[in-house]
Amino acid sequence: MAEQARAHRTRWALLSLALVLAVAGAGRLLAHWIPPETIIANLSTDGLLREKVGVRRVERQGRVLILRVDHDVWARLPADERRVLAEEWLRVWRHNVDQGVVAVVRATDDQPLVNYDATGYARLIDER
């Protein structure tokens, strides 16, 4: 039991670090404005997000940030971790893009995997 808890904490720490590095970029603080292109580039090229979260493609369509993820990799993450990542992506995008919207979708067919409410709370869609 203790080993499982330690593994979970380690995994969460790695994912948190990867997210912060991917979003913040080289030495930038989250409190400052980050160009949307930098956010997209960092999310697109982060190997840990690709491997552990399943991020396959990141693009912008107007004010919408679209994260296409590998469904199988995404689904293996605990639900709480998926929700926190989705909420953080929206928080950072909204901070840097006026009225920014985030779409987390399945890479194979663009089916949505997350719904956000008006406050930014992420509700995972039961895709099965």
Image: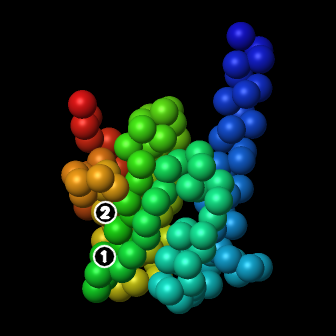
Quadrant in which residue 97 is drawn: bottom left
SS class of the residue under badge 1? strand
> Which residue occupies 42% across, 48% down?
70
Q: Earlier in the sequence, mark 1 or mark 2?
A: 1
Task: Please state the horizontal and vertical placement of residue 74, each as a whole percent of the image.
Answer: 45, 43
Quadrant in which residue 104 is drawn: bottom left
Name which residue type carries label 1. Answer: Val
Name which residue type carries label 2. Answer: Ala
SS class of the residue under badge 2? strand
Assess whether mark 2 and mark 1 are in contact (beta carbons under 8 angstroms): yes
* Quadrant including the C terminus: top left
Evaluate whether residue 17 shows in this view: yes
Graded by Cα atoms within 10 Å as few (under 14), some (14 to 19) or many (20 or more), the crowding at tag 1 reads some
> Which residue occupies 48% across, 57% down?
55
* Residue 61 horizontal side relative to residue 70, left or right: left
Graded by Cα atoms within 10 Å as few (under 14), some (14 to 19) or many (20 or more), the crowding at tag 2 reads many
Q: Is residue 66 above or below residue 36?
A: above
Q: Which residue is mark 1?
A: 64
* Residue 94 horizontal side relative to residue 13, left or right: left
* Quadrant including the N terminus: top right
* Residue 100 horizontal side relative to residue 109, left or right: right
Q: Which residue is mark 2?
A: 103
Q: Residue most toward the front?
A: 108
Evaluate whether residue 84 shows in this view: no
Q: Is residue 22 above or below residue 82?
A: below
Task: Please state the horizontal and vertical placement of residue 113, each as a whole percent of the image.
Answer: 30, 48
